């Protein structure tokens, strides 16, 4: 099995390596505002950390639970201090399945004068285990709301922000 | 599997629009490609789980048939090489899709 996999990729990295280091001058995110959904844990939090190390102006992390968000932000702020990074963290609660919460997120950012340069669509509603008709159409559809409609709304609002700056959107698929 | 071994048949009429996103009749309607691909995949996931002796599940693309919907949109009959639907025996519902059920 490992032989088959290595046919496609000669070197497999499992740790950061110099070419993609967030500390590289060419990769500087200075002046950029970055919005990461699902930013309080796991991949989202790790990306928040790396944008901080790359000196982003603001890193906005969203999640459903405010306490988890605050804990993550406190940890990241401490790391920013140690790294002498200028990044300011902003936390916003947002349930990806709720249209009004998604719109409130973007309305708030606009009111605060924050233009999002980089959007990382990372939050997911993970499926319950079970066949489609066992977990039920209602549950299946609620996952569509969080995993399809939510990201569509995110990208719609990202795309339709006021201003002419270049924007970058990244989708994480796990 | 012959017709006598099958208890139920489920036929999903879907669309090539889920793949042919650059086709002149498709590229202006990306939302349709998105939701039909999703629905077709739903049927495929069910087909992967249900054995054909219980339910034979088939999704198929019927061709690009010139119908009243195109006419209503003002698309001319010769805009692209439309199919006429004879292969599905359209207009005679007793014959439509029969070949898929055997």
Image (cartoon, coloured by chain):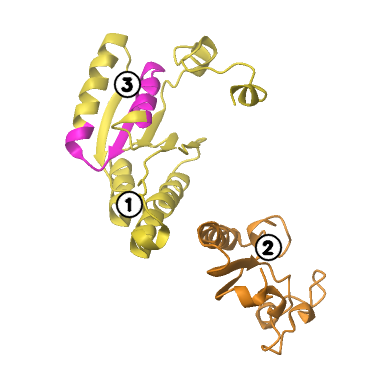
Chain colours: A yellow, B orange
Q: What stretch is highlighted in magenta?
A: A43-69
* Vertical placement of residue B93 versus A33, above or below: below
Question: Where's residue A26, x and y in %?
Answer: 53, 15
Which of these two is toward me, A51 or A15?
A15
Q: Are marks 1 and 2 on the same chain?
A: no
Give the residue drawn at x 72%, y 84%.
B90
Tell me if residue A67 is in the magenta stretch: yes
* Vertical placement of residue A172 versus A155, above or below: above
Give the quadrant of the C terminus of chain B: bottom right
Give the residue drawn at x 67%, y 89%.
B94
Which of these two is toward me, A149 or A90?
A149
Q: Residue A103 carries which label?
A: 1
Q: Residue B60 carries which label?
A: none
Question: Where's residue A159, x and y in %?
Answer: 48, 46
Q: Name the residue under label 3.
A: A87
Looking at the rendered structure, the secondary structure element under dot 2 is helix
């Amino acid at each position: 099995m490992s032989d088959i996999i290595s046919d496609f990729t000669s070197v497999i990295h499992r740790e950061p390596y110099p070419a993609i280091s967030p500390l590289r001058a060419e990769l500087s995110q200075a002046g950029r505002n970055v919005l990461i959904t699902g930013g309080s844990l796991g991949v989202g939090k790790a990306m928040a950390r790396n944008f901080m190390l790359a000196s982003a102006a603001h890193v906005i992390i969203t999640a459903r639970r405010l306490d988890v968000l605050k804990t993550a932000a406190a940890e990241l702020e401490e790391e920013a201090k140690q790294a002498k990074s200028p990044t300011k963290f902003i936390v916003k609660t947002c349930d990806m399945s709720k249209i009004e919460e998604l719109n409130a997120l973007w309305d708030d950012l606009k009111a605060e004068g924050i233009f999002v340069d980089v959007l990382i669509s990372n939050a997911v509603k993970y499926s319950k285990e079970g066949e489609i008709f066992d977990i039920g159409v209602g549950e299946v559809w609620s996952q569509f709301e969080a995993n399809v409609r939510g990201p569509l709304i995110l990208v719609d609002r990202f795309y339709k922000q006021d201003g002419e700056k270049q924007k970058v959107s990244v989708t994480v698929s796990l | 599997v012959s017709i006598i071994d099958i208890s139920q048949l489920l036929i999903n009429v879907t669309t090539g629009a889920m793949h042919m996103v650059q086709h002149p009749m498709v590229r202006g309607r990306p939302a349709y490609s998105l939701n039909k691909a999703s629905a077709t995949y739903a049927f495929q996931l069910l087909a992967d789980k249900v054995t054909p002796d219980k339910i034979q599940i088939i999704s198929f693309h019927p061709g690009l048939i010139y119908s009243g919907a195109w006419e209503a949109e003002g698309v001319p009959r010769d805009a692209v090489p439309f199919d006429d639907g004879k292969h599905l025996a359209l207009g005679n519902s007793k014959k439509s899709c029969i070949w898929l059920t055997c």
